[in-house]
Amino acid sequence: MRQVILIILFSLQGFCEFTLPSAGAKPQGLGNAFIGLSLSPYAMVFNPAGLASITSYELSFSYTGSDSSYDFLGITIPEKMKGNCGFAVLSRENKAFYFSYGKFLKIRNKSISAGTSIKLFKSKDDGKGFGIDNGILYPLRDNLTFGFVLGNLFRNDFGYGFGLSFKIKDYLFTLDLKEREKSSLHFGLEKKMKKFLVRGGIDDKSLSLGISRCFSGIDIDLSISPFILSAGFEY
C-alpha cells in the first residue's frame, strides 16, 4: 500500500512544454511514439521510467537539422542509489539539462518501473526554469508494456502522455497519446531485417522513416520526416 501511494504522489504533477520535445533519431523514426518503450538514454526525455531497465553504461548523441527539434547528448549510469541514473543535455534555441533516475518497484508480485527527470532549462521566451517529469512503465504481458508520463510541478502548462509498446516476432509497434494544449497521436513500427532495423511512423500528422545498424556495439541511427533529418549513435 505504501508503494502504491508513493506512485500516485509521484505522478500527480504537471507537464511543461519542454517535456514533449522531438529529440533523437531513434524516437523520430518511430513517429516520436516512445513513452511505452523508452529503452535507451532517450528515456530521460520521453519517460524516465525506462532507465530502470538499462543494465550498462550507455552513451547517446543525436543531431537534428531543424529548429523545431533538439540536439541530444545523454549518458546512463547503472546501479547507483539503488537504481539507475542518467544525465542529458538538450540544445537548440531552448536548452535543458536533465538529471534522471529510474528503478523497479515490486507491487503485488509485479515489477513496475518508475522514474523521474529533474530538469533545469533556459527558454528563449520564458527565461530560466526548473521542472520535474515523472513516469511509470507497467508490463501488461510479456510482449505488451503500458507507459504513463506526467511532470513539471512548478509550471502552469500541464499535460500528460500514455504509451503502449507491443512486440511480436521481428515486429515492434508503439503508440502514444499526448495531451498538451491539444491532443496528438503518434504511431511507430519497427521491423528487424537481417543486420538492419527499419522504422516508420506517424508523428501526429507527419510521416517519418528511420533505419538503424549496429557496428561493434555502436548503433547508428538515421531518420527523416518533413523538414527534419536526424542522425545519432548509441554506444
Image (cartoon, grey):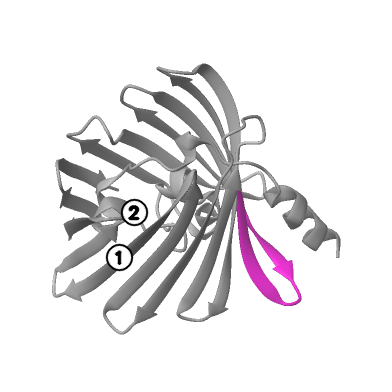
Q: Which residues are magenta?
A: 102-115
Name which residue lies at 31% across and 34% down: 70
Q: Amino acid at mark 1?
A: Gly
Residue at 53% of width from left, 49% of height from top? 48
Q: Quadrant of residue 32?
A: bottom left
- Residue in the foreground of this view, choosing between 58 and 98: 98
* Numbered circle sitting on residue 14: none
- Name the main secondary structure of what is drawn in magenta: strand
Residue 131 in sight from this viewpoint: yes
Could you tell me which quadrant the N terminus lies in? Answer: bottom right
Q: Is residue 186 left or right of residue 62?
A: right
Q: Secondary structure at mark 1?
A: strand
**Residue to which mark 1 is pinned:** 188
**Mark earlier in primary sequence (1, 2):** 2
Residue linked to disc 2: 32
The total number of labels drawn is 2
Quick check: marks 1 and 2 in contact, CB under 8 Å?
yes
Image: 64 above or below 186: above
Q: Quadrant of residue 99?
A: top right
Which residue is found at the position 42% from the left and 58% from the top?
39
- Give the CA separation, mark 1 to mark 2: 8 Å
